[in-house]
């Protein structure tokens, strides 16, 4: 019964959260095209969205389920004010707030899934994510068409999407989970230091986990590096409309994600996670390279997003499920917390560096450099896995 309720909560959480998540993907374009935001503000948002994940490391809502519920409420609440506030800075702040609480909920959410779904967890997680992306295909096309027709319609869209997303809290509130009561009061200094100490301890004592994290760090750095260049490259160089952008995100990227997710989940059940991650990074590395090639032919633009969807299908699964995989019988929230905080650390550097390179060199060199970093991380991770396999076979 516990597993059945959890599967239902997982499914409905993805479906009801998708409208806001889909619209969230348009924020940079809305800021630049509708609200006239400067390149500085777009770069600032790109930097702050991952940086605040470091602060989300400390989020405590009062137990696993309460962490998820309160974070789910706070990340959507500001968008309910969009119809009455016409400000690029407010929308930017709402975007950063969304990412803070979105990341803050992940360790508790993944630990709940680990406890309540001991079998076929990866397959169910991948299936529900694929359904959400499939839903996003139609939503993205509809939203792109609406945003092209009427400039200010994004306000009502955000309001409705946030309201729908809040309905997911009903299913999450019904999750059965045994909470451990904390009777000892931890001093503030200890609460601030403990997550970093625990994370460093995991990296030092688990070389397999450390190799995985460094590989993900390089690939993630490459993808974050190109983020400031994407809206400017699409609008100024390719003259992309909202509808064309929606077609790339929904049809191309969404189909790539949805079609590949079942294969990734089945592969993960029988493949070492670092080997799988290395191949995912190689696929992701093709995205910025193919995107740069769309200057010569527009079909490369859609091909790039389709391939990115395939890579993201694997990356999404590997990133979220790596905590339970490496944790074994331990509490997975510590491992997932390392994922979250390292995403914030690379976000503190990569987008700002990408913004500087964008000003100095233009968008195309930034895209190519991002692709090179992804390729390198994938090759190194596969090489490390092959070397470890050789050692195991020859010294056992």
Image (spheres, helix red, strand yellow):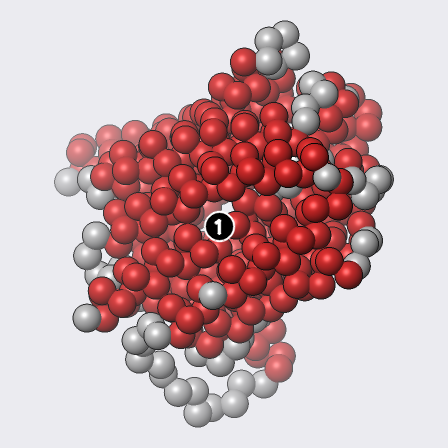
Q: Quadrant for residue 292, please give it.
A: top right
At a point 59% along the width and 46% down the height, the residue shown is 23
At a point 32% along the width and 42% down the height, the residue shown is 273
Q: Position of residue 348 (x, y in %)?
A: 68, 48
Q: Nearer the viewer, residue 143 or 383?
A: 143
Q: Is residue 317 left or right of residue 364?
A: left
| Quadrant location, the N terminus | bottom left
Q: Which of 203 and 225 is in front in this view?
A: 225
Q: Is residue 294 left or right of residue 257?
A: right
Residue 378 appears in view: no
Q: Which residue lies furthest to the front in this view?
A: 149
Q: Position of residue 137 (x, y in %)?
A: 47, 36
Residue at the disc numbered 1: 18
Is 363 situated above or below 75?
A: above
Q: Quadrant for residue 241, please give it.
A: top right
Q: Position of residue 320 (x, y in %)?
A: 40, 51
Q: How many labels does the image show?
A: 1
At a point 51% along the width and 41% down the height, the residue shown is 139
Q: Which of 164 and 302 is in front in this view?
A: 164
Q: Nearer the viewer, residue 371 or 38?
A: 38
Is 180 situated above or below 125?
A: below
Q: In this view, does 242 lie to the left or right of 65?
A: right
Q: What element carries label 1?
A: helix
Q: Residue furthest top?
A: 296
| Quadrant location, the C terminus | top left
Q: Residue furthest left?
A: 396
Q: In this view, does 342 lie to the left or right of 88?
A: left
């Amino acid at each position: 019964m516990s597993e059945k309720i959890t599967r239902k909560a997982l499914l409905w959480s993805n479906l009801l959260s998708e409208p806001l998540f889909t619209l969230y993907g348009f924020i940079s374009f809305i800021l630049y095209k509708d609200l006239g935001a400067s390149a500085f503000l777009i770069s600032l948002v790109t930097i702050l969205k991952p940086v605040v994940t470091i602060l989300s490391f400390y989020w405590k809502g009062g137990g696993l389920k309460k962490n998820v519920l309160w974070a789910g409420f706070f990340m959507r609440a500001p968008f309910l004010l969009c119809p009455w506030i016409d400000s690029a800075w407010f929308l930017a702040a709402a975007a950063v707030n969304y990412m803070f609480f979105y990341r803050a909920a992940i360790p508790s959410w993944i630990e709940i899934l680990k406890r309540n779904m001991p079998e076929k967890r990866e397959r169910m997680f991948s299936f529900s994510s694929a359904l959400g992306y499939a839903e996003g295909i139609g939503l993205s096309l509809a939203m792109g068409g609406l945003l092209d027709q009427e400039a200010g319609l994004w306000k009502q869209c955000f309001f409705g999407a946030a309201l729908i997303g809040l309905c997911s809290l009903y299913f999450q509130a019904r999750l059965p989970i045994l909470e451990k009561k904390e009777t000892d009061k931890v001093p503030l200094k200890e609460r601030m230091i403990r997550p970093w100490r625990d994370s460093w301890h995991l990296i030092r004592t688990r070389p397999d986990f450390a190799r995985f994290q460094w590989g993900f760090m390089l690939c993630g750095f490459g993808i974050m590096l190109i983020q400031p260049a994407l809206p400017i490259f699409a609008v100024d160089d390719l003259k992309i409309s909202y509808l064309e952008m929606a077609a790339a995100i929904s049809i191309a990227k969404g189909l790539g994600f949805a079609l590949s997710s079942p294969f990734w989940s089945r592969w993960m059940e029988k493949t070492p996670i670092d080997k799988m991650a290395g191949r995912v990074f190689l696929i992701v590395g093709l995205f910025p390279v193919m995107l740069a090639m769309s200057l010569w032919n527009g079909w490369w633009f859609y091909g790039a997003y389709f391939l990115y969807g395939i890579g993201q299908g694997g990356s999404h699964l590997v990133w979220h499920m790596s905590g339970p995989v490496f944790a074994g019988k331990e509490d997975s929230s510590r491992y997932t917390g390392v994922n979250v905080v390292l995403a914030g650390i690379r976000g503190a550097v990569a987008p700002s560096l990408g913004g500087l390179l964008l000003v100095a060199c233009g968008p195309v060199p930034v895209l190519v450099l991002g692709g090179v970093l992804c390729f390198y991380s994938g090759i190194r991770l596969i090489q490390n896995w092959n070397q470890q396999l050789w050692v195991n076979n020859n010294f056992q």
